[in-house]
Each structure stands twice: as structure tokens, then as C-alpha cells.
Amino acid sequence: MTALALLGGSPLRTRPFRAWPQFDQAELAALAEALDSRRWGGIHSGSQGEAFETELADYLQVPHAVVVANGTAGLMIALKALGVRPGDEVIVPAMTYLATATAVSLLGGVPVFVDTDPATHTITGSSLKAAISERTKVVVAVHLGGHPADMDSLGDVAGTYGIPIVEDCAQSLGATWNGTQTGSMGTIGVFSFASTKNISAGEGGAVVTHDDALAARIASLRDHGRPRGVAHHPELGWNLRLSEFQSAVLRVQLKRLEPHLAAKAKGAAFLASALSSLPGLTPVPATLDPRVTAHGRFSFAFTFDGEAFNDEANSISPGAFRAALRAEGIPVSTRDLIACPDEPIYADITNRDYSSSRTVSAEQARAACSTLVLLGQAAGSGLLLEGPKELADVVRAVEKIHENRHQLRQEQRRPARPLRLIRSLVKEYPQ
């Protein structure tokens, strides 16, 4: 019987999958053009930044796009533009990247954590309604993993109570809900262009809106509180501008987006079909809502049921499974997920350098964090761009682990060793 690579055997796959992010001579030429211009910063007439704003707005079918330094900066600007002040409550999902919540805290606001739909890990109208108070100022809808949140139910509830929606689209550029781009349905949409995102310049972000007045204020807040075309500074803002080099790269990256989305959709469909037949693995979502007319596929996620996978009373932990999968040459995130209200910055009551938070419910979010396995860009890999021949190795690796599950089960019974093995694995196979 073949030994698992985690425990000293040979890995099933030794050649790498496609890298992420992708680039070629086109990005190099764009960087050279920006360098040669000798105007490397600022958003001015004829600049790369101005051109990218126009191209992104056209793609999203919104009238205004404002490029910023990163997605977190975009969230802060969006919230400030909507009037969030110290003590105001902003409703955010309990399951999201921490920046969704800390953007609220850095403005002195109070993040209010609400639970997520167990099928999609996004918030719904019912979770929003349960959290609304007289202090509620904004709700942030996160399209997690590239899967759009239920904008129908969110829009109904938010509209009834007059609460603006900020769409956190860090992981969902190119995703559509009923044919409409994420980021274009709420009051403001915020995007990230960090290294793992659907288009990337290492860092960067954008804030988009249909509202003319909001767009003007967003642009002002990005530039020291100085409106476009004005020499002076009527309000307090930040320097959160994007460089010309990043904008130049992003213009090329935007042209790659649709071909990449098409390839990732095929890759995800193959994996969903193949992995569904294996015990203990369930793709997220198990069935795609017909209103999701395009999935952003930032990641391919599935839940891992250690008891069903093991087929015995003793369960295999998701952490041990992820470590075993990575050791077999499959790029998977080995980082344990944690619900936002359980992050030390919010869970540790001795912290006093931020405003308080409030948790309405996080049961489903906590359950999801404890069972999720993430492939693709979430693990720093372009794996989803591959065809079935290459992706079959993912399935074969899972089958190998299942066939040798007794090895993992025995290893878990030995005190301390699994933690040491997983730590050494993370060093050997960095994310």
C-alpha cells in the first residue's frame, strides 16, 4: 500500500499547476510605457489611472470608478463617503476576510456580525433584518469566494429600512447576479486587486457607484480631501491613490478576465462533478443558484466531513486532510479559517485600541470555517485554469488519501506529532 506523502511517501504530483497571477509580454510592455512617461503617480488627464477607471466602469456598466491603493482603503472610503462616524453600526458577515470588519473599526464604527447562509457562506436579507438597530448606518454584502450574495433579499430589506448597501467585491470581479455585475447593484461597490484576486497588480483597488455626488466625494477622500480639479482641500481625506505602474498592469489584466473566468468555470465544473462522488466531500454550493449567472471563482471550495470520509467512528480532521492533500502536490490553503468575531482583535476583551463590536449570530459561519477546504487563487494557485487532464490529479490525490485514511487516523492518535508534521509541511510547501 502506498504511503501518504505527508508521512514519508512519494507525492502523487511533482510538477506545478499554473501559477497565479498570470502575465506575459503585454504587462511588461505596459510597465515600460508607464516608466517611459515619467509621470508615475496621480490620476491626471491621459493617465493610465484615468484610462483604467474608464475601462473598469465600462466593464461593470457603472458611470463611475475610482481607483485606490487597495481594497481595504476602498472600504474605508466607501463607508466614510456614506457618513459612517464613531459609534455607528455597520452590519457585516461573520464569515469574511478580516478587512471587511476592520475597515469599520478604523473609522470608529461598530461592526455587527451576522450569520451566513450555510449553502453559500454569504449574508441574506433575513440575517440583515435580525441585526438592524437604530444605530445601523450601512450593510456590507460580501460576495465570498466569487459567489454573489443574495442581492434580491438584501435589496428588499435594505430598501425597506433605507440602509445603503456596500458590496465587498474583493473576490468577485466578473461574477454576475441575474446578469448584473457584482459591484453595480448596491450603493457602492469595492474591488481589490491584490495578488490573489481575479485581476492583480500586487495591490490596488477600486470604488464604483452610480451616484454622481458619491463618486465626487470618493475621489476627494482618495486625494487628501481634494475634489478633482480643485487646488484646495475642503475636507479631511487620505492619500490612497494608485500608481501609474499598477494601473497600467491592471488595464492588461482586465483584458484577461473573461478568458480566465471561462476557463475557471470549466475547471470548477469538472472538480464539482468528480469530487461529489467521493465520501465526505461536498462542493460549495452543492447546487448553483440559477440567479448566479456567472461565478467569480476566486476559489473552489468544498466542505470536508471527516467522519463520512473515514467511514468509521473516529473522524479525520480537516486540518490533517488539507495537509495531506498539499503534501501530495495539490495547492490547497492549509491556514485554519476563523469567523471574524472570533479573531483576537474582536474576541479579546483586553484590546482597547478599536471600537466595540456586536455579534448577532455566527453559528453557521463558525461551522463553515471548521470544515472548508479551499483550492485555487485562495491558495495562491492558478489551478482552476487547468483542463480535466491536469485537474484529475486533484481527484487522484483525494482518492489516495481516502485509500490510506487509516494512516492519517493512526497519526492523529499520536500525541503532538500531527501538529509538528503540519508545521513542517507548511514550511516545505509555502503558500
Image (cartoon, helix red, strand yellow):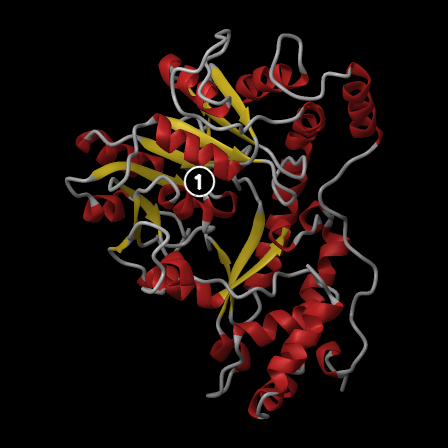
Q: Residue at 67% of width from left, 80% of height from top?
A: 421
Q: Nearer the viewer, residue 192 or 79?
A: 79
Q: Is residue 378 above or below residue 210?
A: below
* Count of residue discs: 1
Q: Nearer the viewer, residue 63 or 219?
A: 219
Q: Is residue 290 above or below residue 270?
A: above
Q: Residue at 36% of width from left, 58% of height from top?
A: 346
Quarter of the figure that contains the C terminus: bottom right
* Residue 141, horizontal then vertical, whole percent: 37, 40
* Residue 385, horizontal then vertical, whole percent: 70, 45
- Residue 360, picture quadrant: bottom left
Q: Residue at 66% of width from left, 25% of height from top?
A: 247
Residue that mark 1 sits on: 148
Query: Which secondary structure, mark 1?
Result: loop
Q: From this viewpoint, is residue 182 visible?
A: no
Q: From this viewpoint, is residue 367 visible?
A: yes
- Residue 400, picture quadrant: bottom right
Farthest residue to the left: give it. 134
Q: Residue at 71% of width from left, 21% of height from top?
A: 40
Query: Local crowd at mark 1 within 10 Å, few (<14), some, or many (≥20)?
Result: many
Q: Is residue 178 above or below residue 228?
A: below
Q: Amino acid at mark 1?
A: Pro
Q: Is residue 273 above or below residue 252?
A: below
* Residue 257, horizontal then vertical, whole percent: 65, 31
Quarter of the figure that contains the N terminus: bottom right
Q: Nearer the viewer, residue 36 or 289?
A: 36
* Residue 304, horizontal then vertical, whole percent: 51, 68
